[in-house]
Image (cartoon, rainbow, N blue to C red):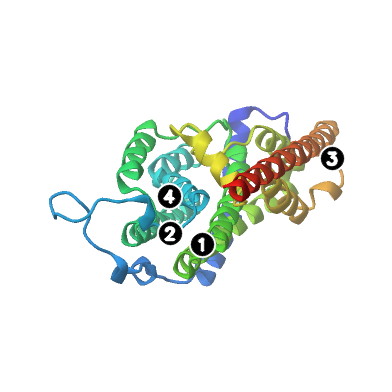
Amino acid sequence: MNAASDPDTLESGWLTELEPVVCRLLDRHLSRTQEWFPHQYVPWGEGRNFDGPLGGAAWEEHQSALSPGIRSALMLNLLTEDNLPGYHWALSTHIGRQGAWGEWIDQWTAEEDRHSTALRAYIHSSRAVDPVTLERMRMSQVRTGYQPRQETMMANVVYVAVQEMATRVSHRNAGRHSGDATCERLLSRIAQDENLHMVFYRDLLEAALHIDADAVLLAMCECVESFQMPAVQMPGFGQLAMDVALAGVYDLRVHHDEVLVPLLRSLSVWSLPGLRPAGEQARERLAQVLAGIDERARAFEKVKAHLSAARSGCRMSG
């Protein structure tokens, strides 16, 4: 295969040539994944009835032990996980449900579904966030659905590799910054799943690079340059994302340093030999895009520092 192939031929070629790789990676994944149960990570003893038919107490902000930024991180992470039906549909549409590909998609979906189950139970039992706001946003998010911007099978594989890495980091950082041992334990467990998913897609990309590095680099450049989190169309996403960035959970610096740079390095993108002109151009463009993200991250760090200083001044004067 090569980057100039007919699009339909290229798509079917990828599916056929990578099928044995998917089979091997799926077997490896199943040997590494560990069974776990969401109910064992939820602080049920802290729970009590909410207002409504059961006559409990309505949620109030003081009931949450978490900072506003971490509450936003939990909401954003959970609402992202809630849109799993859309992600399953997108992967099935672009990849198919046959053979090892279909087995992997179904396994991945089953594992991902645990994340929203566990997160929502933790949030409700600990009264971490406003449950009414959360449910209204969930309804809006799932009604909106998910429409991938990536048009090719390989572009979708690149996207999910980056996204799984980003999700792993986001869950892990939210747990670390939460100040809640139960929250950190749960999010660390979810991050372990996300890491195995990332490793699957990363190693699938590595195999694809050996088949047609030029085509994969073109897909990588397209993805990295236009990357957006899957919940970007969700109402209120901008404010939640800003809260999460200011809390240090996930921002452009994290995206550059903890997601893109290590992922591309692990794939040896910068030392791939034998590229044709299109591949070389894509690699050069990829380097330029990374430099641009790094520059924007530096600018945002200055904004964060200014806001932090302003808030400290307000607290001292108060």
Give the Cα distance between marks 4 and 3. 41 Å
Say whether residue 184 is left or right of residue 137.
right
Observer-nearest of 222 and 127: 127
Observer-nearest of 284 and 96: 284
Q: Is residue 17 visible?
A: no
Write down the residue under mark 2: 111
Query: Mark 1–mark 2 contact, CB under 8 Å?
Result: yes
- As helix, strand or loop, the secondary structure at mark 4 comes to helix
Amino acid residing under circle 3: Leu
Observer-nearest of 158 and 48: 48
Earlier sequence position, callout 1 versus callout 3: 1
For image coordinates 48% across by 70% down, the residue present is 181
Image height check: is 241 above or below 107? above
Residue 193 is labelled as 1
Observer-nearest of 181 and 154: 181
Amino acid residing under circle 4: Leu
Give the Cα distance between marks 3 and 2. 37 Å
From the image, state whether disc 3 or disc 2 is nearer to you.
Answer: 2
Give the Cα distance between marks 1 and 2. 7 Å
Report the number of numbered marks: 4
Give the Cα distance between marks 4 and 1. 15 Å
